[in-house]
Image (spheres, rainbow, N blue to C red):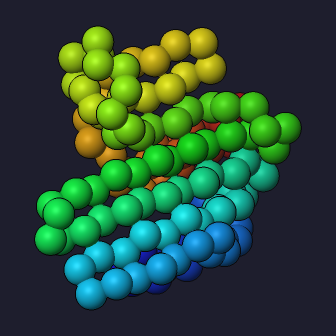
Amino acid sequence: MEILKWLDDTSIVKAWSFLDSPEWPTGYYYKIKIELINSDLLYASEYFDWDENVRTYTLHWQDKKNNLITRWDNTAHHRHIKTFPFHTHLPNKIIESEEMTLEMVLEIISQHIGNQQNY
């Protein structure tokens, strides 16, 4: 998987490990625990099947005390959201979102960590 090299080369990732990673002829699933350089955690899971033309994901970012910072996903709930099924969970609300990838989320987190280090 190309994502593994990307995780190794990203400066905000301190360590990562697979929690699950089955593959089959038409797709894959992975769940990865990613420890960030500021001790936050990112849990990333993705299911993809070419035959079914299906991609589901959850990208869950939390602080070192297990408090939610942000979770992006496309679980088919929150039908009232204009961008359904794509949405973002914040600590106190759910908002619209575009379709997200792990790379996009790591870029957002990288900007956030960079801003924290400037204070």
Instruction: Name the residue located 58 percent from the left edge and 73 percent from the top edge.
Output: 20
**Quadrant location, the C terminus:** top right
Query: What is the residue that sits farthest to the bottom in this orientation?
Result: 25
Residue 12 coordinates in the image, percent (x, y)? 61, 60
Question: Can residue 11 be spotted in the picture?
Answer: no
Residue 41, above or below 31 = above
Q: Nearer the viewer, residue 56 or 14?
A: 56
Q: Is residue 10 left or right of residue 49?
A: right
Residue 55 coordinates in the image, percent (x, y)? 27, 56
Residue 6, above or below 73 = below
Q: Nearer the viewer, residue 59 or 37?
A: 59
Q: Nearer the viewer, residue 84 or 110?
A: 84
Instruction: Name the residue located 70 percent from the left edge and 60 percent from the top edge.
Output: 35
Q: Is residue 87 left or right of residue 11?
A: left
Residue 9, above or below 39 = below
Residue 79 coordinates in the image, percent (x, y)? 29, 19
User: Image quadrant of residue 1?
Assistant: bottom left
User: Image quadrant of residue 70?
Assistant: top right
Q: Is residue 78 left or right of residue 94?
A: left
Residue 89 coordinates in the image, percent (x, y)? 50, 26
Instruction: Name the residue located 70 percent from the left edge and 67 percent from the top edge.
Output: 14
Mark count: 0
Question: Can residue 81 be spotted in the picture?
Answer: yes
